Amino acid sequence: MTPWTRQNPLEKLSSNGRAIALMVLSTILIAGMHVLIREVSADMPPIQIAFFRNFFGGIVFIPIIARNGFGFLKTNRFPMHCTRAVVNMAAMFAFFTALSIAPVARVTAIGFSAPIFAAVLSALILHEKFRLRRWTAIVLGFLGTLVILRPGIVPLDLGSLLVVFSAAMWGITLIIIKILSRTESSLTITGYMTLLLSILSAGPAYYVWQTPSIESLGWLVAIAILGTLGQITMTESLKGAETTVVMPFDFLKLIWVAMLGYMLFAEVPDFYTWLGAGIVFSSSFYLAYRESRMSAREEP
């Protein structure tokens, strides 16, 4: 390598290291998207924001299409892409609505239960072997979610219930992404997500349509770009390592969102939000540890 050649820093990392770095970048991008959704939701319905997030998300693909055409959309698994889009739309509508009516850090904290749902589904659908310790970690993860919600002590608000539903749907989506990533590139997966979600969300958005201002349009474009880039980096991360290796770093979203929520909306997460999120994170981290140990034993 000549002195004038710059090496990509990610090339110096191991496969898991690159996947983790991409997940960290994804948390920054998605946290920014969450905060902007909360900001724009004061001016238009969340369903309409979801439509613009998907429609403007195509902006990211313009340079790719200009250079390589539509070849990245070639696939033999179109039905699975459609299934992913339907489940993803349900998760997105619920999550965007929750962001508009509940504190952004609380929504993000409850959303951490998605990897726990994904872990359960990986045992049921992908037939991954889960022993007592890993099931214990999963149970603790769900208990962490209950610490955040505190049902019976604090009234369950609609926003929190919507996030739990969204997390379950997102857990299903994670499994589908993992299956698709065996044969599809991250661009193909994200490209079909953007295209199909734009089509599926157009109808509901029409019924609640409010013409956005120029300022709101700018924020909507930013939401779409952050969300699409966050999706691409997350998909690449999941493709580069096991789900349970990289998903614990999703916890960083709470750090970024808590800081931005305090600066922009004067929202301060309570003790139970941090405690519950910490329990969920610890459970996910242990699942990642057990996964790495099992993978090491299976290597020749």
Image: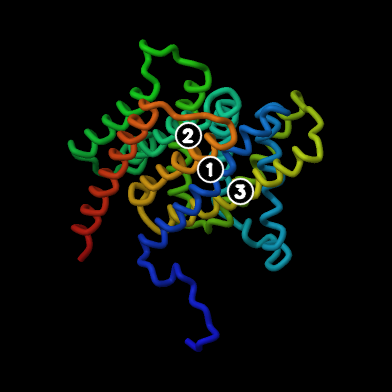
Q: Residues within 10 Å of mark 1 (few under 14, many from 20)?
A: many
Residue 200 screen position, x and y as percent: 67, 35
Q: Gap in Å between the C-alphas at discs 2 and 1? A: 9 Å
At 37% from the left and 48% from the top, the residue drawn is 243
Q: Is label 2 in contact with label 1 (beta carbons under 8 Å)? A: yes
Q: Amino acid at mark 2?
A: Thr
Q: Is label 1 in contact with label 3 (beta carbons under 8 Å)? A: no
Q: Residues within 10 Å of mark 3 (few under 14, many from 20)?
A: many
**Residue 154 vertical position relative to residue 78 in the rendered view, above or below:** above
At 45% from the left and 15% from the top, the residue drawn is 156
**Between 125 and 67, the one nearer to me in the picture:** 67
Q: Which mark is residue 108?
A: 2
At 79% from the left and 28% from the top, the residue drawn is 210
At 58% from the left and 47% from the top, the residue drawn is 78
Q: Amino acid at mark 3?
A: Leu
Helix, strand or loop for disc 2: helix
Q: Earlier in the sequence, mark 1 or mark 3?
A: 1
Q: Gap in Å between the C-alphas at discs 2 and 3? A: 16 Å
Residue 85 location, quadrant: top right
Q: Which mark is residue 226?
A: 3
Residue 107 screen position, x and y as percent: 49, 30
Q: Which mark is residue 274?
A: none
